[in-house]
Amino acid sequence: MKNAKAFTLAEAMMATIVLGIAAAGVLLPFSTGAAVRAEGVRRTLSAKLASDLMQEIVNTPFGQIVAGYNAASEAEGMVKDTNGVVFTDSNYTMISRDSMCDYVYVPQESGAGVAKFILVKVRVYYSGKEIAIIYRLVSE
């Protein structure tokens, strides 16, 4: 038996361990790339949702913006499209958004009388973390 040409159990186990470590090293960039891609998809989707809500607000008559959109929010999984229908796709389940609208005066105005500008802020969150924000000054 001294001239046997086969692997021992210990050698086979060591080869398996070395192969597992090498495979993990090769697969790590792929899993990291998938995570980066998923983050990019979330950011793109969030920017689109923020832009859509901002456009909806801007298209609202000036006198109705603050009453309709100040402190408005949509909970996670309850984000709606422009027709008021909740998105049912799984990409939207962890997304929420809110808006803030305040009358503001520009430096050229005296601050007396009715404000002619509204500062609109739209924020989109993924799993409670702010991921996109848009500001816009809307005039009368």
Image (spheres, helix red, strand yellow):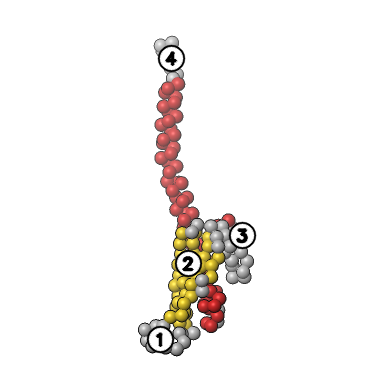
Question: On the image, numbered disc 3 is attached to which residue?
Answer: 88
Disc 3 to disc 4: CB gap under 8 Å: no
* Residue behind mark 2: 123
Q: Earlier in the sequence, mark 4 or mark 1?
A: 4
Q: CA distance from mark 3 to mark 1?
A: 45 Å
The residue indicated by pointer 4 is: 4
Q: Is residue 17 above or below residue 67?
A: above
Helix, strand or loop at mark 1? loop
State yes or no: discs 2 and 3 in contact (Cβ < 8 Å): no
The answer to whether residue 107 is visible is: yes
What residue is drawn where x is 57% and y is 64%? 79
As rendered, which of 44 and 7 lies closer to the eye? 44
Q: Earlier in the sequence, mark 4 or mark 2?
A: 4
Which circle's residue, 3 or 4, is located before the other in the chain? Answer: 4
- 22 versus 51 height, above or below: above
According to the image, label 1 marks what residue? 111
- Percent across and percent down for residue 114 are 46, 87
Across the whole image, how many numbered discs are drawn on residues?
4
Q: Compare marks 3 and 1 and give the one earlier in the sequence.
A: 3
Q: CA distance from mark 2 to mark 3?
A: 20 Å
Q: Are marks 4 and 1 in contact (CB under 8 Å)?
A: no
Q: Residue at x 40, y 86 (%)?
A: 111
Looking at the rendered structure, the kind of residue marked 1 is Gly
| Closer to viewer: mark 3 or mark 1 | 1
Q: Nearer the viewer, mark 2 or mark 3?
A: 2
